[in-house]
Image (spheres, grey):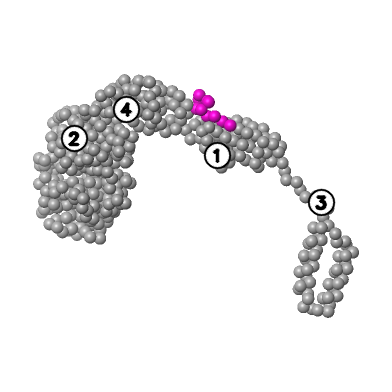
């Protein structure tokens, strides 16, 4: 150890060196600072501080993966794990796991000790959930995750392990019907199914078929009664009554996996409208149409129609485009009465007049000579019985279709109420007015029925026939209330596309 006397002698030596060599000054200063610091450390007689004693908490659970909370604060740890930084004292420990009730307990952490906690959720009867099962018709066997419970509907099934559970109803003469439900501890979940009569209703979902998604945006059929459907993120779906196939950006020239609209034309070509342009599929060959090679102002396509001569209408987010005699024409305020805004729906009338609905603006038609608009403040275009119809209806037309005889049906949703208008011989009238609902699409079948897809089910209307029939998951084989499309195949089978309910096949007899 260096003594105080030695420090003094060393400082005298440095002073003499500095007086004889001025350039040695800076170097000496550095040496002094290092020396004094070392001396201070050497001279300290205080023993080093001993780290505080810490406890170790080990927490595990079955099932694992529960979040660990201490004294109402999230620790960031999940079971199984351990914490080694706890001081002596009392702690409130809470375990939180999705679908399960919270488990809380108090622990005493000893000084420099260890505490182990294990929670078995499944040993607590209060952790299990219950499913209230009913079916139309009743008498269906209930299966949970493909295992039979031995219970027949209507019944309450208890002791269901929390989580996402697959519930299946099985009854002879009906298709097995399955859906997934969220089951929570000490909570009653309702499972209410309308079973599919195998002779009438069949619904294809990801649980009972090879369909790749239950999110279906639109549907059409070809001359062979094969089914084509659009999806929100997986592309184009094809079903030939034997197997399911999918066309997407990875395995085909399809420009986008978001398919918004489909049209099968008179020449056997399938027009596919996406948010990145149009694809035309013709027996294995593809043609891509977009803003770069047509008159389309934007690639987002919301509606397509094609007449018997091959002329086409395309509704986009920035206006209406017409294919006429092989030439693409953008219709706007300079050559029509249409503004260059979002065209939601386009349709050819059987007499080849064209119709287009412009979002929040108007409904427009063109008879090869004159444009007519409804909803714009133009006295020349507002005449006849339209005055009996609420004025805002014309700005909200979202669905259009025509009977072969020429009568048109137009669907609008105004303030969450449905209005379905009939256009006949130049006159308008309201044929349906339903509150608290939204219309999505209209389809006129060969036998003059009008099918109206809504967010609360499917409606079937026929002029001079009463009542209007409604179909929903409680009264039919549909698995979703939200109808996105309706069509009829050449074999007279109806196909209904839904949001989160897959595709439904309906064999109607009247």
Q: Secondary structure at mark 4?
A: strand
**Going from the N terminus, do you reach mark 4 or mark 1 first?**
1
Q: Position of residue 195 (x, y in %)?
A: 28, 27
SS of the residue under disc 1: strand
Label 2 and label 3: CA atoms lie apart by 94 Å
The x, y position of residue 63, in whole percent, is 51, 33
Q: Earlier in the sequence, mark 3 or mark 1?
A: 3
The magenta-colored residue range is: 118-127
- Judged from the image, the secondary structure of the residue bearing numbered disc 3 is loop
Q: Position of residue 416 (x, y in %)?
A: 29, 38
Badge 1 density bin: few <14, some 14–19, many ≥20, Cα 10 Å:
some
Disc 2 residue crowd, few under 14, some 14–19, many 20+, Cα 10 Å: some
Classified by dominant secondary structure, the portion drawn in magenta counts as: helix
CA gap between label 4 and label 2 equals 22 Å
Residue at the disc numbered 3: 46
Front one among 461 and 18: 18
User: Which of the two residues, 433 or 35, is positioned nearer the viewer here?
Assistant: 35
Point out which mark residue 493 bears: 2
Instruction: Using the image, tell me which numbered label, if any, was put on residue 193.
Output: 4
The image quadrant of residue 60 is top right
Is residue 228 something one can see in this rendering?
yes
Callout 4 crowding tier (Cα within 10 Å): few <14, some 14–19, many ≥20: many
| Contact check, label 4 and label 3, Cβ < 8 Å | no
Disc nearer the start of the sequence (2/1): 1
> Where does the N terminus fall, quadrant-wise?
bottom right
> Is 414 left or right of 337, judged from the image as shown?
right
Q: Residue at x 64, y 32 (%)?
A: 107
Earlier in the chain: of badge 4 and badge 3, it is 3
The disc placed on residue 78 is 1
Question: Which disc is residue 209 wearing?
Answer: none
- Is 397 above or below relative to 45? above
């Amino acid at each position: 150890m260096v003594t105080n006397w030695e420090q003094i002698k060393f400082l005298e030596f440095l002073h003499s060196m500095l007086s004889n060599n001025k350039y040695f000054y800076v170097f000496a200063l550095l040496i002094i600072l290092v020396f004094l610091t070392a001396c201070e450390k050497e001279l300290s007689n205080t023993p080093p501080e001993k780290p505080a004693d810490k406890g170790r908490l080990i927490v595990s659970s079955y099932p694992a993966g529960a979040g660990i909370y201490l004294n109402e604060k999230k620790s960031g740890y999940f079971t199984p794990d351990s914490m080694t930084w706890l001081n002596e004292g009392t702690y409130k420990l809470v375990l939180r796991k999705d679908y399960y009730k919270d488990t809380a307990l108090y622990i005493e952490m000893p000084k420099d000790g260890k505490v182990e906690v294990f929670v078995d959720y499944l040993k607590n009867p209060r952790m299990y959930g219950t499913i209230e099962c009913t079916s139309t018709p009743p008498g269906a066997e209930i299966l949970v995750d493909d295992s039979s419970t031995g219970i027949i509907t209507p019944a309450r099934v208890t002791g269901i392990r929390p989580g996402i559970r697959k519930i299946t109803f099985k009854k002879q003469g009906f298709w097995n019907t399955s859906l997934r439900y969220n089951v929570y501890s000490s909570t009653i979940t309702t499972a209410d199914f309308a079973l599919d009569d195998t002779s009438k209703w069949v619904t294809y979902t990801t649980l009972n078929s090879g369909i790749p998604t239950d999110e279906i945006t639109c549907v059409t059929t070809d001359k062979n009664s094969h089914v084509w459907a659009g999806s929100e993120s997986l592309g184009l779906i094809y079903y030939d009554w034997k197997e399911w196939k999918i066309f997407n950006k990875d395995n085909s020239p399809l420009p986008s996996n978001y398919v918004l609209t489909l049209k099968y034309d008179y020449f056997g070509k399938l027009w596919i409208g996406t948010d990145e342009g149009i694809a035309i599929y013709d027996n294995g060959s593809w043609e891509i149409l977009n803003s770069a090679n047509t008159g389309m102002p934007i690639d987002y396509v919301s509606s397509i129609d094609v007449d018997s001569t091959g002329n086409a209408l395309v509704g986009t987010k920035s206006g209406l485009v017409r294919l006429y005699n092989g030439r693409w024409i953008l219709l706007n305020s300079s050559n029509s009465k249409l503004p260059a805004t979002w065209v939601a729906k386009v349709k050819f009338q059987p007499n080849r007049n064209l119709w287009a609905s412009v979002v929040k603006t108007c409904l427009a038609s063109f008879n090869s000579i004159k444009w007519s608009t409804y909803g714009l403040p133009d006295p020349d275009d507002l005449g006849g019985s339209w005055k009996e119809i609420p004025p805002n209806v014309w700005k909200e037309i979202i669905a259009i279709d025509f009977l072969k005889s020429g009568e048109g049906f137009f669907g609008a949703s105004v303030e969450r109420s449905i209005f379905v208008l009939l256009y006949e011989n130049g006159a308008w009238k309201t044929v349906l007015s339903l509150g608290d609902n939204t219309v999505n699409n209209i389809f006129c079948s060969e036998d003059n029925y009008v099918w109206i897809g809504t967010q609360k089910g499917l409606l079937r209307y026929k002029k001079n026939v009463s009542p209007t029939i409604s179909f929903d998951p409680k009264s039919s084989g549909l698995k979703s209330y939200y109808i996105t499309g309706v069509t009829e195949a050449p074999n007279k089978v109806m196909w209904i596309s839904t949001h989160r309910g897959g595709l439904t096949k309906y064999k109607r007899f009247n």
